Image (cartoon, grey):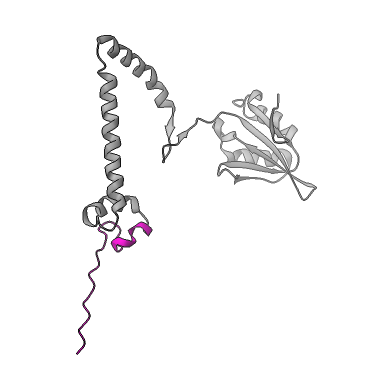
Amino acid sequence: MAEKPQAVRVLYCGVCGLPAEYCEFGPDFENCKPWLRCHAPDLYPDLLNEENRADADEATQKLQAVAISGSGDGRGDASAAASGSASAPKQEEVKRLPGGKIKKKEKQEVVIEKIVRNKRKCVTVVKGLDLFGIKLSDASKKLGKKFATGASVVKGPTEKEQIDVQGDIAYDIVEFITDTWPDVPATAIFFVEDGRKVAAA
């Protein structure tokens, strides 16, 4: 007589509720990692190696910090303190993105670009007005009324919002921007011509 098949015991993740071997495909694998290290270390041996590597890096950084701050005579401590205080403002300016990338502070400038479509139709693109504290929706309404054309706020190729104005109004728009918003200096307005930035003033 054939033997009855035994039921398979499945270990479910305590964080996301998926079977443990499918956690990496779930919505929040990063939150599942600590639970998996404790309850299913055999399924993800890379997590243990990663944790050990992170612990080793942390210990190395602590040792280096101790070595720098306690380097011999009193002059070393004073110089370390002076260099530490000098680098403190720089650390405030630099923002770190996920993955350790550094986010640079954007320059306050307005970039105007004329894009030609279908050989005849022009669209004037205005980027950077929001860096001066101007609401783009209000700015697009004012541009549309002034030049009697369609103007809308759209996301550009870099996922930043910009204003698209129908028609070739690139050179008329500079005077309008400086008159309407005095916070925007004429020296901060640039045109894009043949792939190069050219100052408007």
In the picture, measured across the screen, residue 102 lies left or right of residue 177, that is left
Foreground: 41 or 113?
41
Indicate whether 198 appears above or below 37. above
Task: Quarter of the image for the N terminus: give it.
Answer: bottom left
Q: Does the magenta-highlighted stretch encompass residue 7?
A: yes
**Which residue does the image show at 20% across and 83% down from the upper left?**
4
Magenta segment includes 40: no
Is residue 137 among the parts visible in the rendering? no
> How many discs mark residues in the rendered view?
0
Furthest residue toward bottom: 1
The answer to whether any part of residue 71 appears in the image is yes
The boundaries of the magenta stretch are 1-25
- The picture places residue 47, in percent across and down from the top left corner, at 30, 50
Q: Residue furthest right?
A: 120
Which SS type dominates the magenta stretch?
A: loop
Q: Quadrant of residue 126?
A: top right
Q: Quadrant of residue 111?
A: top right
Give the side of residue 93 with respect to residue 128, left or right.
left
Q: Name the residue at 30% across, 40% down.
A: 54
- Compared with 56, 63 (above or below) is above
Q: Residue at x 77, y 51 (%)?
A: 118
Query: Of residues 187 and 198, which is closer to you in this image?
Result: 198
Side of 151 relative to 99 (left or right): right
Q: Residue 88, position in %: x, y?
A: 37, 21
The C terminus is located in which quarter?
top right
Q: Residue at 30% of width from left, 55% of height from top? A: 44
Q: Nearer the viewer, residue 29 or 47?
A: 47
